Image (cartoon, rainbow, N blue to C red):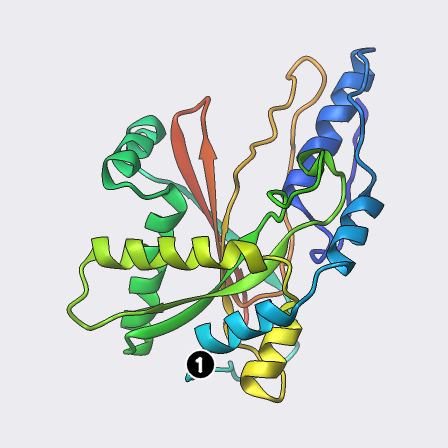
């Protein structure tokens, strides 16, 4: 058999781009015609043409008064690799189809529900009603033709802030997540380092946990190949990756964590 190894730095690993790449490979292996491609240069040109003035004003207001509560820095262990990471995989009980219907009944998205759950967890852990964590935006909803077909790193990691009262209901926290995500979309190309520099002055981290919701699952043709292993270090102490499976009708959760934490 033939093995294919893709080794990519986590800062360049764009799930949507990789899915597009693998689908194009499948078409080639099946002697099918490739769809028209959108050059990555088009995305770069669009990104560098953005005026960040209005975005600066938005982030200054959105993050005003934030006081980051980061995970405690672990004690260095002898002969330990502080960057070493591991993964824990699990499947949620219940049907993904049913879950999506419940989301519609609540007028929220699946992402809003997971954001609310993560915000609850951080709130309990930090004993704070004002929490901040990272959310990964695909940035493929920008007004650029063919953005969904780009093989390249278009994603951006931005802060989501959930500031609620101690008596807030789950439904209210879901709505806060929904409003934040909707309000951030026009500013989704904002550089995170620029935001951190403006908000904190020294450019230090606003958050050290991350939530990733995978919108596109790579459907591989079993007659051609299969995934044997998928692992990586994403550069954050703790990451919650949500992977919905339409065909298996379930939701998988993968927790990525640095061993030192």
Residue lying at the far left of the rendered structure:
167
Name the secondary structure under disc 1.
loop
Q: Position of residue 146 (x, y in %)?
A: 71, 34
Res. 82 visible in picture: no
Residue 29 location, quadrant: top right
Left or right: 137, with 121 as reference point: right
Say above or below: 212 vs 229.
below
Q: Which residue is mark 1?
A: 64
Q: Position of residue 258 (x, y in %)?
A: 55, 66
> Which one is nearer the viewer's eye here, 261 or 43?
43
Taking the spot 78% from the left edge, 25% from the top edge, the residue there is 25
Left or right: 223, with 70 as reference point: right
Taking the spot 69% from the left edge, 65% from the top edge, the residue there is 51
Res. 131 visible in picture: yes
> Which one is nearer the viewer's eye here, 199 or 187?
187
Taking the spot 54% from the left edge, 82% from the top edge, the residue there is 199
Q: Position of residue 151 (x, y in %)?
A: 76, 39
Label 1 packing within 10 angstroms: few (<14), some (14-19), many (20+): few
> Which one is nearer the viewer's eye here, 193 or 245?
193
């Amino acid at each position: 058999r033939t093995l294919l190894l893709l080794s990519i730095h986590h800062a360049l690993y764009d799930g949507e781009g990789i899915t597009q790449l693998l689908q194009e490979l499948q078409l080639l292996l099946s002697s099918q015609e490739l769809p028209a491609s959108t050059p990555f240069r088009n995305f770069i040109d669009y990104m560098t043409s953005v005026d960040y003035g209005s975005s600066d004003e938005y982030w200054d207001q959105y993050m005003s008064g934030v006081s980051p509560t980061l995970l405690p820095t672990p004690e260095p262990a002898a002969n330990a690799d502080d960057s070493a990471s591991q993964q824990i995989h699990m499947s949620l009980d219940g049907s993904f189809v049913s879950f999506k219907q419940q989301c519609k009944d609540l007028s929220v998205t699946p992402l809003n529900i997971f954001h609310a759950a993560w915000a609850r967890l951080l709130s309990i852990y930090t004993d704070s009603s004002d929490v901040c964590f990272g959310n990964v935006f695909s940035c493929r909803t920008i007004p650029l033709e063919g953005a969904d077909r780009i093989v390249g790193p278009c994603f951006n990691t931005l802060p989501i802030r959930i500031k609620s009262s101690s008596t807030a209901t789950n439904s209210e926290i879901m709505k806060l997540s929904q409003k934040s995500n909707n309000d951030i979309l026009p500013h989704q190309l904002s550089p995170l380092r620029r935001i951190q520099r403006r908000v904190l002055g020294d450019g230090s981290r606003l958050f050290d946990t991350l939530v990733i919701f995978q919108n596109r699952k790579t459907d591989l043709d079993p007659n051609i190949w299969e995934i044997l292993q998928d692992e990586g270090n994403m550069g954050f102490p703790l990451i919650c990756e949500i992977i919905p499976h339409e065909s298996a009708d379930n939701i998988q959760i993968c927790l990525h964590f640095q061993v030192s934490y």
